[in-house]
Amino acid sequence: MHIAWLGKKSPFCGNVTYSREITNALLERGHKVSFLHFAPEDGEVDSWPGRQEVSLPCLYLSQGYTIPSLKSSKVLIDALDDLKPDLVHASLTLSPLDFLLPEICQELNLPLVATFHAQFDSKPRNIKSGTQFLAYQLYAPFLANYDRVIIFSEIQKDLLVRLGVPAEKVAVIPNGVDIDKYYPGVSNVKSEFNVKRIFLYLGRISQAKNIESMLKAWKNSQMGSDSRLIIVGDGPLAAYLQTLYTDDDGIRWLGFVADEQRRIEILRGADVFILPSLVEGLSLSLLEAMACGLACIATDAGADGEVLDSGAGVILDTQKVTGQLETLLPVFRDNPELTTALGIKARQRVLERYTLSRNITQLERLYAEVLKQHKVDYQRLAGIKSRFI
């Protein structure tokens, strides 16, 4: 099968990881993948091996959204017409082009699948989650015109259906992690930082991730010289927060770590992974931490609560995160047997529900269903047209 994948290569975020991991797995299963992605006209982007690539011109590219240039639609149409894929899969980048894709693919007679990454709070209560809800309201009328829409949880499905997307078009396929890469193993990170206990955050440094609540809790808890909070990632709040929370507080900022093997080494060396987000989709960083055997603490944002339910981790309310962490951090510091037990449960949960292999099998099944339905619809339309000729 030939899949034209429309996704993201930079800047680094969950969408980039999703596109890389899914397309890698599709290639390994013998499918052909053409990768179409946004890139500044004057910029250079590293190629990903094994894929034919097409750069779509854009005016602005960020972790959150993309502004395409005026000629991006024509470049996309010409590329799809030339590539002639069996199917288009768009890992939506929150760009105006997302709304044009159904019309473009209909004109080219190509079936169209979307993965909708918009974050949400599973119990919408705050301003940020309300803003995210507006994204669902904005996208729903257009998603109804896609052949299938992939989301990560039943909560998201219920929301989209209530907003008018036909239930039969919405497929729940949770994110998956490559358990052959992400697994518990030896790491020198503790000796590198000369500590006994490592708590880790890995992700964007943005308002939605609610990082400052975690940092306040760490500072207030006075965790001692044998524990360290390591922050891996970058984002709009990084420079500001680094001036307030420093090495003197037992906090080490590593910035964006591009080397995947280095990120895995850091995960393996940590004891506890913390994700204090106000809104989420389904965090790949959380799944990677679980696969590496870390005890995980995360808010009930997006589908993350579903991932950790029934004892696979500790679930926080998205409200008053600082207070909850002030209680939990010393407990996790002083009870290594607890973190070990939770890490084992976290790894087991990933093996049961969230492997990349399981994800790809579900995706292949969905592709087959879409192609079959597309063929039936095309034959029906051709029959109708023939009666009027």
Image (cartoon, rainbow, N blue to C red):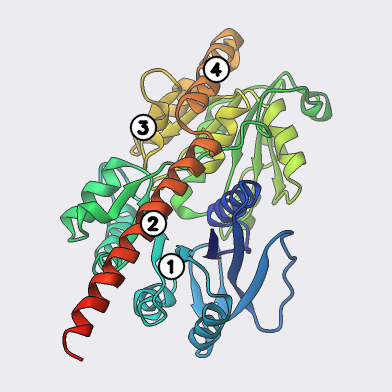
Q: What amino acid is at disc 2?
A: Ala
Q: Measuring 60% from the left and 48% from the top, which residue is drawn there? A: 21
Mark found first going from the N terminus, 2 or 1: 1
Residue 15 at x, y percent in the picture:
53, 56
Q: Is residue 35 left or right of residue 214?
A: right
The span from disc 4 to disc 1 (Cα, nearest Å) is 38 Å
Q: Which residue is mark 1?
A: 94
Q: Which residue is mark 3?
A: 306
Position above or below: 60 against 249: below
**Quarter of the image holding residue 111?**
bottom left
Mark found first going from the N terminus, 3 or 2: 2
Question: From where the camera sits, is residue 344 visible?
Answer: yes
Looking at the figure, which quarter contains the N terminus? bottom right
Would you say the residues marked 2 and 1 are in contact, meaning their CB atoms lie under 8 Å apart?
yes
Would you say the residues marked 3 and 1 are in contact, meaning their CB atoms lie under 8 Å apart?
no
Mark found first going from the N terminus, 4 or 3: 3
Position above or below: 346 against 12: above
Residue 321 at x, y percent in the picture:
40, 35
Marks 4, 3: nearer the viewer = 3
Q: Measuring 65% from the left and 47% from the top, which residue is drawn there? A: 28
Q: Which residue is mark 4?
A: 332
**Quarter of the image holding residue 103?**
bottom left
Mark found first going from the N terminus, 4 or 2: 2
Q: Which residue is mark 2?
A: 118
293 and 217: which is toward the camera: 293
